[in-house]
Amino acid sequence: MKKYIRRLFRSLVLLSALCAVVSAEEPVKEAESQLKLSGDVSVLSAISQKPSSMQNRSSFQMPEGRLGALWSYDSDVALSGEIIYGKARDSVDGRYNLQLESAYFEFRHLLSESHWMQYGLLPHPWEDLSEKFWGYRYLGARGPTLAFRYGYVNRSDLGAITGAAFNDWIQWSLMVVNGEGAGSEEAGPKKDFHLAITTSPREIGSYGGKFNLGLLVIEGAFDNIDPDVSQKERVSVLLGFEKEFGFSGSLELMMSKDPVDGVNQVVADKVDLSSQGGQVARGQGGSAILKWRTLGSLGKIKDKLVEAFARIDQWNPATSVSARGLRSQLLGIGFFPRQNLQISLAWSEVLYENNHAASVRDSSDLLLAARMKW
């Protein structure tokens, strides 16, 4: 499959170059260097209902905070970086660690007006697309979207990515990375290839909302595992629709193929596949999100955005083995008293099939969370 991705990449680059030749656009004017800062802080309170040993236990948490910087040297070259905190604690004194989530060079307008390349510690573009239709990544461990929630795609990794637009509606990108994620050193010579094809929001029919489509294909291999079973594959398809008021949502479907020895007790909330050592695990499942938006008031705060949301994930990490799947569901209300302030009240539950893992129990929590962005 890797050779087909390479052929497709060469075709995409050639097509982008041809688009640059046939489109007689004006040259990009040089811009003065600019520095932009952004970030967010989130806090979370949780009251546990399951398992019984945790019943009625409450806790205050900081799921994650971000501080990002983008320095545009001119219209063609930029440097970007992001630091996260609250994700992990120091093993000695328990303080929150600062972690470098991304840091990369960006080069624009290479083979065409829309062609670009990034090089360094890269954020994964699929997260931005899936999070666009969800918006509640800050709800603790259960907040990230499907592929990231269950450990099948790294949020950032070391490598290079390039992409361009076919037209004003369809874009593509190809990423080549170590495959170990930002928190690990490269374990060997093998690399992962990530091909993403996405669309810009577009109105279809009389619905009045805008639709997006996305396709993600990952081809790679695990290092230090028998080459006959080391292959790593992911295919995700996403359909999303959004509307300023009324119903919005998305449907994401994913399939995976991994060596059991590479993912045992790592993915899908540490699923136990030790009885299948030396074999291949094929996973499948999906995530459905539905939101309803309107304007509401709370005390002196009038006519602010309110949305009710529901999300259901169904994931089976090994379809050939019985009773290893899980189901996760989130129900809640989000309130936006200010443009960059989001407050949420939610109920979360995760149910595991009987043989998922001996150390894992069904869990449910009541969550109160807030996030401020700037």
Image (spheres, grey):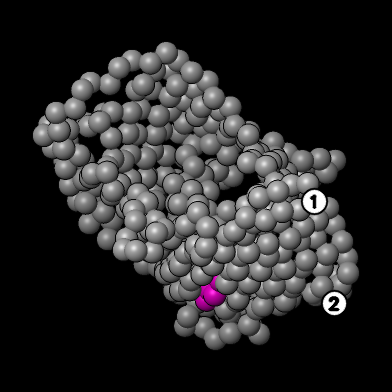
Q: Are marks 1 and 2 in contact (CB under 8 Å)?
A: no
Residue 186 visible in rendering: no
Q: From the image, tell me which residue sits under label 2.
A: 52
Q: Position of residue 355 (x, y in %)?
A: 64, 83
Q: Tell me the crowding category of disc 1: few under 14, some 14 to 19, or many 20 or more residues within 10 angstroms, Cα based.
A: few
The residue shown at (80%, 60%) is 46
Magenta stretch encompasses residue 203: no
Mark 1 element type: loop
The residue shown at (47%, 80%) is 319
Label 1, label 2: how many angstroms apart (C-alpha)?
Answer: 37 Å
Residue 182 visible in rendering: yes
Which dot, 1 or 2, sits closer to the camera? Answer: 1
Q: Which mark is residue 299?
A: 1
Q: Tell me the crowding category of disc 2: few under 14, some 14 to 19, or many 20 or more residues within 10 angstroms, Cα based.
A: few
Magenta region: 313-317
The residue shown at (81%, 40%) is 95
The answer to which of marks 1 and 2 sits earlier in the sequence is 2
Mark 2 element type: helix
**What main secondary structure does the magenta stretch of the protein show?**
strand
For the residue marked with disc 2, what is the amino acid? Ser
- In the displayed structure image, the side of residue 20 where residue 85 appears, left or right: right
Picture layout, residue 10 above or below residue 102: below
Picture layout, residue 113 above or below residue 92: above
- In the displayed structure image, the side of residue 102 where residue 27 appears, left or right: left
Q: Nearer the viewer, residue 187 or 341?
A: 341
Picture layout, residue 165 above or below residue 1: above
Can you say which quadrant of the picture contains the C terminus?
top right
